Amino acid sequence: MPFDGNTFWFFILAIGAVVGFLVWWSAKRAQERRQALAQLAAARGLAFSGEDPIGVPGTFAQFELFQRGDSSYASNVIRGAVEGRNYCACDFQYTTVTYTTDSKGNMERQEHTTYCSAGIVELSYPVPAIWLRPENFLDKAAHLVGFHDLEFESAEFNRVFHVKAENREIAFDIINAQTMQRLLASPFRHIEFNGSAILIFDERTWEPETMAAALDLARSLVEGLPHYLFDKLRERAQA
């Protein structure tokens, strides 16, 4: 069948209709998700904003996540205090810019945007930084040549998590047997204790129930910290 002008415009209109539908569907899903996040916040006695009224990247600048990228911002922010403890959850995106040179010497600018979600819960006292992420093949290879992260009593935990810490002694106090069990039972693998808060995040956008689960895990980690820990940290600070 010849490809005449009418056929050409039919395909153009069909493609336009598909693109328009996808844009509408994406906007509809985003609006439904914002409504669900607002309901989640209200159910927990927290506030919700589609924008970032507290400047999340600056407020929690101690976390490595919020230092990433050449440009970044937070959105869909849940925040507030419950029973004297501060909570925050949000979406976060950062854009990394790289420059490459082609065979003719022309410079090309490339951007890559990463979309994340995060949950943050306040601690009672600042702690030295501890970084947990999934153990990967390169980590296992590094172990073979003598480069090790922190090793714990649980072989399963060591297989799953790669752990670095500013203070080894405090890290072993914080990541005790109960904490290891909580972390292994959860789907979350990117966790950071730093300053006066715990951060849990993923490099993907969470559904509202996942964001709720992240806040619940962070709260349980806070509640699971040993009672002597903060006394030890105060004594170290005074010394």
Image (cartoon, rainbow, N blue to C red):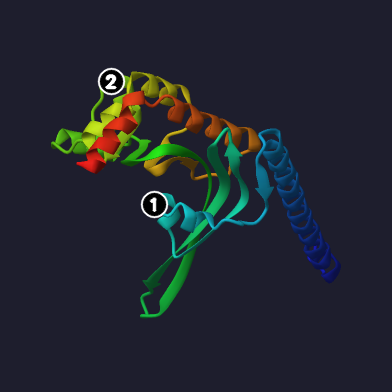
> In this view, which residue lies farthest toward the bottom?
105
Query: In this figure, what is the number of numbered marks?
Result: 2
> In this view, which residue lies farthest toward the front?
238
Which circle, 1 or 2, is nearer the viewer? 1
Question: Can you give x and y, in whole percent of width and height, for residue 83 in the image?
Answer: 57, 32
The structure residue drawn at horizontal position 82% and vertical position 67%, both measured from the top left corner, is: 9
**Circle 1 is placed at which residue position?**
62
**Circle 2 is placed at which residue position?**
155
Q: Is residue 57 among what the camera can see? A: yes
Mark 2 lies on a secondary structure that is: helix
The image shows residue 94, relative to residue 185, as above or below, that is below
Where is residue 24, by image quadrant? bottom right
From the viewer's perspective, is 83 left or right of 239?
A: right
The front one of 32 and 138 is 32
The crowd level at tag 1 (other Cα within 10 Å; few <14, some 14-19, many 20+) is some
The residues bearing labels 1 and 2 have C-alpha atoms spaced at a distance of 30 Å
The structure residue drawn at horizontal position 72% and vertical position 51%, both measured from the top left corner, is: 26
Mark 1 lies on a secondary structure that is: loop
Question: Can you give x and y, in whole percent of width and height, for residue 14 in the image?
Answer: 80, 58
**Quadrant that contains the N terminus:** bottom right
Circle 1: residue type: Gln
The front one of 132 and 216 is 216
**The label number, if any, that marks residue 152 in the structure image:** none
